[in-house]
Amino acid sequence: MSEKRVYLPRWAFGKILLLILAFVILAQLALFAFYSQKNTSAQFKVNRDVIARQVINLIQTVENTPLDQQNSLVSELNIPNFSVSISQQPKWAPQFKNKSLWHILWRISEQAPDIQLSFYLDNNRWLNILAKVEPQSPLIALFLLAMEVTLTMAILVSLWSINRYTTPLKNFTEAAERLGVDLRTDPLPIDGPAAIRAMAHAMNKMQQRIMDLLAARTQMLAAISHDLRTPITRLKLRAQYIENDKLQEKFIGDLDQMEAMLAETLAFAREEGRKEQRVLLDLASLLDSVCQDFASVGHAVEYSGTFERCTYQGGAVGLKRVFNNIIENAIKYAGNARVSLQIDKDEYLIFVEDDGPGIPHEQLAHVFLPFYRGDNSRSRQTGGTGLGLAVAKDIIRAHGGSIELKLREQGGLSVVIKLPSSTLYTIRL
């Protein structure tokens, strides 16, 4: 039994890395604070032991000095953090009299934060000592803290710089994807670093040039259509003078077909200039209503998909046109159509199946081209202009979906439409 692998999306992987980085920074700062406290305590203990020994040495020095010179010796002592004096009464506690120097060292080693004592000399005189104990090298701790803060700031600035580049790039990518399905989407905002602004400006200029070319093409087709309608109308009037009724009927039929092709061609060209507002709709209800419309006039069309609410934000008129075109093709060439709707993770699957003769496999890749008609659709009764599937593909692609044709093993044709459950595209219909 194979194990199913789960892959994290890129955005989740990046957020996990940022969380790990933030945790490492916080843990490092906490360890630094703990180490600094411990290190300060250790330095304080070491310094206190050193100063305690200096106090013993000072007592021993003063005690071994003659009585008449002790006062002058104490007055000339200039030791940092030390205060030494001789008085008739003890000044500090504890007070030591006839105690060994080892006993004094043991007692003062336990004092905190400062060391203070009074030691009895002779002739009712006391040696008073006050020694202040400070940890060594406080600048080292400040230097390490400054390094930690600098490292943290460098990481934060790096993250800010990366985000300043990646966010415009993400917006640029999304806009490029929208532009691939809708040339009339909003232009890219000109912001971010200089390189991103230059790319956005170039993309907007390219979008505008393409829109101008499409507008020129539509205008050209409109002019051709307008110019051709006049001679077609004159030919219809002249055809009324043809005495052969069958020839007259064929002649007028050809002219009607030419006029219909011109109208559909112009409508197809103008489709790219229209937009339909997106609304929330229920795909299941929409498909069921379309099938009921065909069934109510006697066509063999049935809907067998889910009846659960399938909320979708799209163009109701455009999607209904797609479903109508596909079902009409199935009825025209097969006489029946079965429509179903399925929900697959983050997309909707719509199937339109028939039991007709199908089309050759080599034509599947060409049926969505404008004006393409297969060999089975070139008669006047069934043949069209070859724009129905091209328009359907254009509408589905504008919704961010896809459409394809498949041959069924049992015979017939299956049209598969995939629509994303949530679309961010500007729908052009």
Image: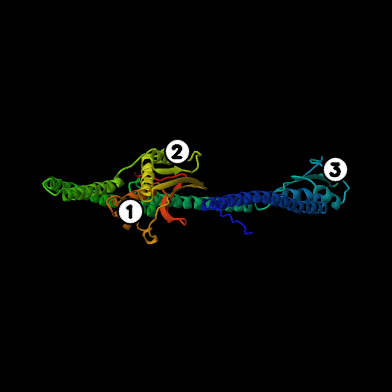
Picture quadrant of residue 371 = bottom left
Residue 359 lies, in percent from the top left, at 38, 57
Q: Nearer the viewer, mark 2 or mark 1?
A: 2
Q: Please report whichever mark, 3 or 2, sits nearer to the chain's N-terminal start.
A: 3
Q: Which SS class for mark 1?
A: helix
The three-letter code of the residue at mark 3 reads: Asn
The label nearer to you, 3 versus 2, is: 2
Circles 2 and 1 in contact, beta carbons < 8 Å: no
The residue carrying pointer 3 sits among few (fewer than 14), some (14 to 19) or many (20 or more) residues within 10 Å by Cα, namely few
Determine whether 373 is above or below 278 in the image: below
Residue 202: image tag: 1
Task: State which mark lies toward you, 3 or 1.
Answer: 1
Give the amino acid at mark 1: Ala
Question: Which of pointers 3 and 1 lies earlier in the amino acid sequence?
Answer: 3
Q: Residue 258, position in %: x, y?
A: 21, 50
Which residue is depicted at the point 42% across and 43% down? 301
Q: Counting residues from the N terminus, which is met first, the one under dot 2 or under dot 1?
A: 1
Residue 285 numbered tag: 2
Instruction: Say which residue label 3 marks.
Output: 124
| Distance between the alpha carbons at the discs numbered 2 and 1 | 43 Å
Q: Which quadrant: the N terminus?
A: bottom right
What x and y, as percent, mark residue 144? Answer: 61, 53
Taking the spot 33% from the left edge, 51% from the top edge, the residue there is 390
